[in-house]
Image (cartoon, rainbow, N blue to C red):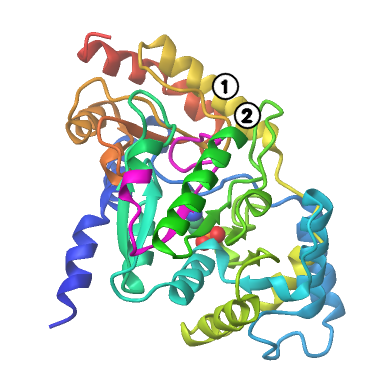
Amino acid sequence: MISKKVVENLEKSSWVRAMFDKGTKLRQIHGDDKVFDFSLGNPDPEPPASVKETLKNIISEDPKGIHHYMSNAGFLDVREKISKKINSETGLSLTVDNIIMTCGAAGGLNVVFKTLLDPGDEVIIFAPFFGEYNFYIDNHGGIPVIIPPVKDSFEPDLELFESKINKKTKALIINSPNNPSGYIYSEETLNKISDIISSKEKEFNTTIYVVSDEPYNQLIYDDIELPSILKIFKNSFVVNSFSKSLSLPGERIGYIAVNPDIENIKTVIDSLIFSNRILGFVNAPALFQKVISYSLDAKVDVEIYKARRDRLYEIITECGFSCIKPQGAFYLFPKSPIENDVEFVEHALKYNLLLVPGTGFGCPGYFRMAYCVSIETIENSYPAFKALAKDFNL
Ligand code: PLP
């Protein structure tokens, strides 16, 4: 028998996968253009032309040693460029040592949790959240503690947050812009979180780390500024990737930036590098470390996503659904017109609409739509949403 826990978790993690399977069946029956698949957050714009050009150049130059093992933290020149870029944006003083190259943000998060967690340690997550966090925390013996948002908003419930911190609280995950809501936490909210953490650290004589998961930090609309987590929280890590900013999710390339003021910095950094090694990543993919190092100022055309966000938001709200307009990422997270979001999402299949229930993101009563689809698909989905809304008297 294989692990009972894995089999159990497989059952729990099946929302997006289940929708994907249903979509495949619907496409076979009705044809691609009649199915409106908003289930998968798989970036569909191609990587920027400059990134493809860089890739071709590196391959044609074929520098000696590019395919070798390297330091488990990654190439020095790449890490140096990333540290300088962060310094120029924040005014902080990171060095090459503060950067560890990882296999995407998912790899980076696992490396951070492996480094931080002893069995039974608690990690606080603000809902709604990327469901994989539950498994990443559990991978390293931790226990997720979920804080629902303030009613009818995506603001974290800070009173509840404060009340849930105890001696076992090891970390807080922040994901802004957020998957699934596209919400961005304001500097004011982050400062309040920081005050709560400081007072609880004093009360319990502990350290509470902030792990900021930022793969959507380049997908921001309406000139909103993303506050710097490294500047607000001393004991913090930023985990980032190029999966969304450069449309490179399959290349598995990202990094961890360690706050230069973190306590016991040498042990923390050595432990992160060790964790990267023993989790079996060994090091981040060599070729794409080099590619992104020449592409730090590039990003996908955010206007593509913005146009889709605007049109989909318009369609959804015109049909009577209630939705907070997202400020970043590529998701909409409207309210389900009935309490049972799973039942609602099942009903939407009648119109070939593939949505994901909020339950899969720790936030029942909502549903997620990923607008990694063409503007035509969004436009053509209008009658289906109208019919769906009518069924629920919207
Ligand atoms: N964190 C969030 C919030 C995500 O939505 C995703 C992927 O969708 C990841 C992390 C993993 O990203 P990566 O492809 O960089 O591992």
Dot 1 alpha-carbon crowd within 10 angstroms: few under 14, some 14 to 19, many 20 or more: few
The percent position of residue 269, horizontal first and vertical second, equals 62, 78
Helix, strand or loop under label 1: helix
Segment tinted magenta in the rendering: 162-185
| Residue occupying the point 26% across, 28% down | 348
- Asked whether mark 2 lies closer than 8 Å to ligand 1, one says no
Kindly identify which numbered label has been placed on residue 269.
none
Q: Which residue in the structure is indicated by mark 1? A: 310
The percent position of residue 157, horizontal first and vertical second, equals 38, 35
Helix, strand or loop under label 2: helix
- Asked if the stretch drawn in magenta spans residue 178, the answer is yes
- Asked if the stretch drawn in magenta spans residue 254, the answer is no
| Residue occupying the point 32% across, 38% down | 148
- Main SS of the magenta segment? loop
User: Can residue 24 be spotted in the picture?
Assistant: no
User: Can residue 87 be spotted in the picture?
Assistant: yes
Q: Which residue in the structure is indicated by mark 2? A: 306
Instruction: State which quadrant residue 362 falls in.
Output: top left
Amino acid carrying label 2: it is Lys
The percent position of residue 138, horizontal first and vertical second, equals 31, 68
